[in-house]
Image: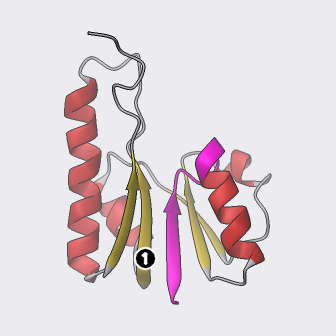
Amino acid sequence: MGKIVVFGATGRVGRSLVQILAGSGAEVRAVVRDLKKAEALPLVTEVIEADLFDPQAVTTACTGAETMFVLTPENPLAQDVVADARTVIGNYRRAAGTHRIPRLVGLSSMGAKYVG
């Protein structure tokens, strides 16, 4: 199956996904914002710290991957959550294109809590 890069690997969904993939024997690279939180992850092939707003960090994290699992984290304190999401998604797109990654799975709950 090739290397699977999981962004948001210490969050609720990402942590569960890493656990399932690692348990099935997949080659997993967990991408996290805080390496200390990664200590609670199940054994994975590799853990990388990266800022999703840094295009080079995202591209580097995807080196050698055949599949990307991406999240669009929403920061309620951000000045413009839509602009932030566009930036992060653009960084994912750039990384996928640079490395010609054939499979990308995206998850977003952006706006799910808002009414109106």
Q: Position of residue 113 (x, y in %)?
A: 42, 19
The colour scheme used to paint the residues is secondary structure
Question: Which residue occupies 53% across, 50% down?
Answer: 8
Q: Position of residue 50 (x, y in %)?
A: 47, 54
Q: Position of residue 6 (x, y in %)?
A: 52, 63
2 left or right, relative to 72: right
Question: Which residue occupies 28% across, 68% down?
Answer: 95
Query: Which image quadrant: the C terminus?
Result: top left
Asked if residue 17 can be seen in this view, the reply is yes
Q: Position of residue 9 (x, y in %)?
A: 60, 54
Q: Residue furthest bottom?
A: 1
Q: Is residue 97 magenta?
A: no
User: Which residue is more in the foreground, 20 or 5?
Assistant: 20
Q: Name the kind of residue labelled 1 in the image.
A: Thr
55 left or right, relative to 47: left
103 left or right, relative to 16: left
**Placement of 23 over or under 87, stated as above or below:** below
Classify mark 1: helix, strand or loop.
strand
Q: Is residue 9 magenta?
A: yes
Quadrant for residue 85, please give it: top left
Asked if residue 11 can be seen in this view, the reply is no
Quadrant for residue 47, please give it: bottom right
Numbered range of the magenta stretch: 1-13
Q: Residues within 10 Å of mark 1 (few under 14, many from 20)?
A: many
Quadrant for residue 59, please give it: bottom left
Question: Which residue occupies 60% across, 48% down?
Answer: 13
**Placement of 75 over or under 17, stated as above or below:** above
**Tag 1 residue:** 67
Question: Which residue occupies 63% across, 60% down?
Answer: 17
